Amino acid sequence: MSTHDHPFGKPICIWNFTDQKKVLIDSEGLGNIFNHPEIKDRKVAIISLIGAFRSGKSFFLDYCLRFLYAHFPSINNPNKEQSDSFQKNPNWMGDEDEPLRGFSWSSATNRDTTGIVIWSDVFLHTMDKTGDKIAIIVMDTQGLYDKETTLHNNSRIFSLGTLICSIQVLNIANRIQEDHLQYLQFATEYARFAGVDSLEEKKCPFQKLLFLIRDWNNPEDHSYGIDGGNQYLEEIFKINQDEKSELAKVRQSISNSFEEIKCCVLPHPGRSVASSKEFDGRWAQMEADFKNELQNIVEHLLLPDNLTLKKINSNESSGSEICKYIESYFQLFES
Ligand code: GDP
């Protein structure tokens, strides 16, 4: 094991396309995860992060993994101690000098890859309130808004990612721009169209969407975190009340596509994180307000009561059902 490898998992690329526009699918890798004996009968929460290359996605996902490993057993780490009811570990961010491991800084992650990548290890939890046994899967969707990828391919990646996950985190630098919203609308319409047989037209086909804004420059207008982010989002979604305008239509279409939409604005992480070639992910080098907000938003997303389970046609589905569903979407998205 190299010093950069994670002891329990690695990124598995399940869907990808080449320069020749050929789609590459890893059905075996997909099946190994969703049809695993521990997963196939469980309900599943699938957290996905989507956004451009080099926008801090892997960094954020690796802190999500750190939270999950600090709290839950997983298929590759089954012996982790569990108390009868969930208890938040206030020290889940670990040692201040601990380098990050996971999606980034791993030899298995090829930065030129465009596609959908799943963490090979899956977290297991029994919900305190319902007793439901659930599985938690983490997914990275790479390449969105990348200038080298065509609009068609970007839409396919975004749409597939949105179809597969139950919590979609859209990673954006600085602020939400009109083209982000148009793009999001285009991709969700594309996904609705592709899934016409199995998505009920009138219901919201997708579940949770979180806009994650990095390097937020306007804390005087809207404070850092989820409250400020939600106020900002309200402002963005409210400005055009004229039902006939194109801008209003875009907003309406997005609102109708997701059951819940939220926003979080994060401060700039500081120069070491943003530009040092030596930076290895340790939180000792982050600005204090960034570290606090990072901790808050990861908890907001991943505390068990906040996890959204994957539904297909309004029903919470099992790992094996979701696997079949993903395979059928892979076929639809082959061209
Ligand atoms: P990915 O390609 O989207 O997965 O990006 P990475 O997670 O590999 O991060 C790319 C670079 O951005 C790294 O040098 C990170 O340290 C840095 N980074 C991480 N988070 C932030 C952030 O919130 N703001 C800025 N400006 N840089 C960040």
Image (cartoon, grey):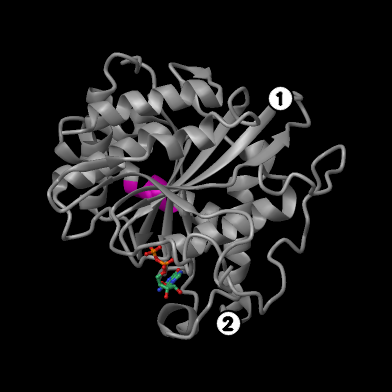
Give the vertical position of 313 relative to 170 (above or below): above
1 vs 2, front mark = 1
Q: Residue at x 30, y 31 (%)?
A: 330
Q: Is residue 203 visible?
A: yes
Magenta region, residue range: 232-236
Q: Is residue 182 visible?
A: no
| Count of number-bearing discs | 2
10 Å neighbourhood of mark 2: few (<14), some, or many (≥20)? some
Does 233 appear in magenta? Answer: yes
Which residue lies most toward the right here?
A: 84
- Which is nearer the N-term, disc 1 or disc 2? 1
SS of the residue at dot 1? loop
Picture coordinates of residue 235, whole percent (x, y) = 37, 49
Q: As shown in the figure, which amino acid type bears the numbered disc 2?
A: Gln
Give the vertical position of 221 relative to 27 (above or below): below
Regarding ligand 1, which quadrant of the image does it lie in? bottom left
Locate residue 131 relative to residue 121 in the image: left or right: right
According to the picture, the residue beneath numbered tag 1 turns out to be 132
Does 59 appear in magenta? Answer: no
In the depicted view, which residue is nearer to us: 59 or 5? 5
Answer yes or no: disc 2 within 8 Å of ligand 1: no
Q: Quadrant of residue 290?
A: bottom right
According to the picture, the residue beneath numbered tag 2 turns out to be 285
